[in-house]
Image (tube, rainbow, N blue to C red):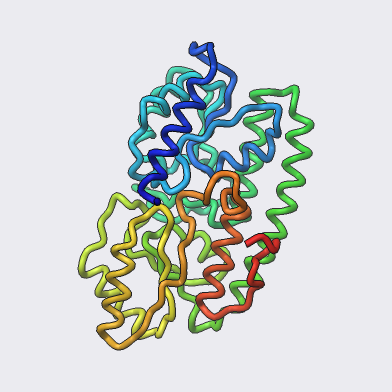
């Protein structure tokens, strides 16, 4: 079913981008590139403005090649919000080209005041949403761009932003309590690729990825062997797969640890570069993070409610 998700998303996107009779420039829609940005934008914009998201569930933005329908959406949008920091990979050149032509296109994760980026200068870590406090700042940036685009809705944007940030503050407090409940010697999160470093820095847990920041890089035999040795030495109980990344490297690590006499379980599927199903709780930013936090903490021996932060899992 996972392999069908990109096709389903593409078909839905094609329908949403061609449903209007006016196919000229600026059809009034707000376009976002990833689900995390789309959800925050919808929370703040409300029902007054249409938001179309391009890269849907189960799709890896690092490797995603933009479809013609997506390029059409971008060209006709009144406002485009994307992450930046090289997350969108092959779509970045399309966005830059349209921005250079004067279209209102903004990277909401770039230039945040007081935020120290991880990664390096050649490839900064783009996964800022894994730190809830940083994503709250991104929500402010999104609200600013929405109000600049449609100033008649500014007061409502400000009110909705305040209400949403209160929910994020509560979620952040839940995350801090939850991660602190993991036995200290087991506070190690191992995933398919290095998408969780901001989460690790924010909540005091060591993070190891089999692949690097971008899934464009392949994990080599040495990477897997080194990680196996580390898991065996530290007796880490679980490793996690991701909804938008193939599982083969995770399976290789589990098999390698078993050959050395240490059982590492699959702790569950985490949402890294894409959220859950559209219309579901996990298909929202808060639901995605609630799922990730609760899944990680349970698998690593911590104490969290079975149904998560809001009792919705």
How many marks the image carries: the answer is 0
- Name above or below for residue 55 compared with residue 193: above
From the image, which quarter does the C terminus lie in? bottom right
* Frontmost residue, 34 versus 169: 34
Picture coordinates of residue 7 (x, y %)?
A: 38, 39
Residue at image position (41%, 34%) is 10
Picture coordinates of residue 49 (x, y %)?
A: 66, 27
- Name above or below for residue 212 compared with residue 65: below
Picture coordinates of residue 216 (x, y %)?
A: 29, 49
Residue at image position (62%, 37%) is 41
* Frontmost residue, 195 versus 109: 195
* Frontmost residue, 151 versus 182: 182
Q: Residue furthest bottom?
A: 261
Q: Residue furthest front?
A: 1
Picture coordinates of residue 90 (x, y %)?
A: 33, 36
Question: Residue 263 sits in which quadrant?
Answer: bottom left
- Name above or below for residue 192 compared with residue 145: below
Horizontal side of residue 207 vs 305, given as left or right: left
Residue at image position (59%, 31%) is 51
């Amino acid at each position: 079913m996972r392999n069908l998700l990109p096709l389903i998303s593409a078909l839905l996107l094609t329908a949403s981008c061609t449903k209007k009779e006016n196919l000229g420039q600026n059809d009034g829609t707000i376009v976002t590139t990833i689900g995390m940005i789309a959800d925050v934008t919808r929370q703040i914009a409300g029902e007054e403005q249409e938001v179309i998201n391009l890269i849907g569930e189960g799709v890896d933005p690092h490797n995603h090649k933009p479809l013609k329908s997506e390029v059409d959406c971008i060209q006709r949008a009144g406002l485009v919000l994307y992450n930046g920091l090289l997350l969108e990979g092959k779509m970045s050149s399309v966005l830059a080209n349209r921005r250079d032509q004067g279209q209102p296109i903004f990277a909401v994760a770039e230039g945040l005041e007081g935020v120290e980026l991880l990664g390096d200068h050649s490839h900064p870590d783009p996964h800022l949403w894994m730190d809830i406090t940083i994503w709250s700042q991104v929500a402010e940036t999104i609200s600013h761009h929405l109000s600049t685009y449609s100033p008649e809705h500014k007061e409502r944007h400000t009110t909705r932003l305040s209400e949403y940030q209160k929910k994020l503050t509560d979620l952040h407090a839940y995350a801090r309590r939850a991660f602190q409940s993991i036995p200290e010697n087991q506070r190690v999160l191992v995933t398919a690729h290095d998408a969780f470093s901001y989460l690790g820095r924010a909540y005091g847990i060591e993070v190891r990825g089999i692949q690097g920041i971008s899934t464009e890089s392949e994990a080599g035999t040495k990477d897997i062997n080194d990680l196996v040795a580390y898991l065996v030495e530290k007796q880490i109980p679980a490793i996690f797969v991701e909804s938008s990344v193939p599982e083969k490297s995770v399976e290789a690590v589990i098999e390698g640890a078993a050959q050395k006499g240490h059982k590492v379980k699959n702790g569950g599927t985490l949402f890294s570069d894409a959220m859950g199903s559209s219309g579901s709780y996990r298909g929202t930013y808060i639901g995605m993070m609630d799922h990730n936090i609760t899944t990680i903490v349970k698998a690593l021996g911590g104490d969290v409610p079975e149904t998560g932060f809001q009792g919705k899992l």
